[in-house]
Amino acid sequence: MINRLLKILLILTISYSCHAQVLNKSRITSYGVFKFSDQDKESVDDLILCCRNNLPKIADILQVNFDPKTLIEVFPNQTEYDQNIINKDLKGSPAISGYGKIQMVSPIASIKIANISYPDRLLFLVHEYVHTSIDQINPLMPTFLNEGLACYFGSRNFYQAVVDKYLDHVNNKPTVDQLINNYDKIPGVDVYSFIFIDFLVKTDGEKNLLKTLKDHSDIKSKNNNWIKYLDSLKHYK
Ligand SMILES: [Zn+2]
């Protein structure tokens, strides 16, 4: 038993020291504690600036506090990220959050999704920060609203470009009920989640967004307008 325990401790120590060696730099900021490698000194400056330019206004709209104690690990490449990821099922993703932590692949390293500009790569951090704040709005928020908010506030340019380019070729119009209950089965569901938040803001105004997010009990009543909104995006292009 003790032998086994020692073995486990040894494994933990080894993986910890590998990890510490890669992210050997640290910066404590009002936007989180950054751990990063030598290559990312400048990217971290840019990430901090990106947080400063975006987080205060998002905090104001959503009435949340972004925790400055959040640990932000910026891995130098996809391999290091995948080896240390907090949820093994999401290996290959560019960023993830949970347990008081945000992990991301360096904004200067290559990732699977091609052609994302450097400023949009920086915004992945803001996207994850929005995810970390959802419980303050509504711990029971459906996944599509949670993802939609992160995309809307954290990756708006990127998703708007996807909508402009591809929506005309897509005939799927998921209902609100499907977005709530079949989230994992809808192709491109993150895009629809983004459009749904855009729809709420455009039809009810940004001021009413928070009200709908806090109490989404009658959100299905918006279905007719939602489907019309999806149609209108196609028609007026
Ligand atoms: Zn997300």
Image (tube, rainbow, N blue to C red):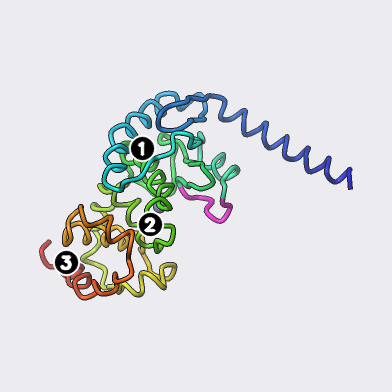
Snapshot quadrant of residue 218: bottom left
Mark 2: which amino acid? Answer: Asn
| Residue 106 can be seen in this image | yes
Specify which label sits upstream in the sequence, 1 or 3: 1
Say if 40 sits above or below 226 in the image. Answer: above
Q: Rounded to the nearest whole Å, what is the CA distance between mark 2 and mark 3?
A: 25 Å
Mark 1: which amino acid? Answer: Leu
Identify the secondary structure beneath mark 2. Answer: helix
Q: Nearer the viewer, residue 128 or 137?
A: 137
Q: Rounded to the nearest whole Å, what is the CA distance between mark 1 and mark 2?
A: 20 Å
Which circle, 2 or 3, is nearer the viewer?
Answer: 2
Q: Is residue 50 magenta?
A: no
Q: Which residue is mark 1?
A: 122
In the shown orientation, is residue 89 left or right of residue 167?
A: right
Residues at circles 1 and 3 in contact by the CB criterion of under 8 Å = no
Identify the secondary structure beneath mark 3. Answer: helix
Residue 175: give its label. none
Q: Which residue is mark 3?
A: 234
Q: Which residue is mark 2?
A: 146
Specify which label sits upstream in the sequence, 2 or 3: 2
Residues drawn in magenta: 87-93
Residue lying at 22% horizontally and 70% vertically, measured from the top left: 226
- Tell me residue 217's x, y (percent): 33, 70
Q: Sort mark 2 into few (<14), some (14-19) or many (20+) by Cα contacts within 10 Å.
A: many
Snapshot quadrant of residue 168: bottom left
Q: Sort mark 3 into few (<14), some (14-19) or many (20+) by Cα contacts within 10 Å.
A: some
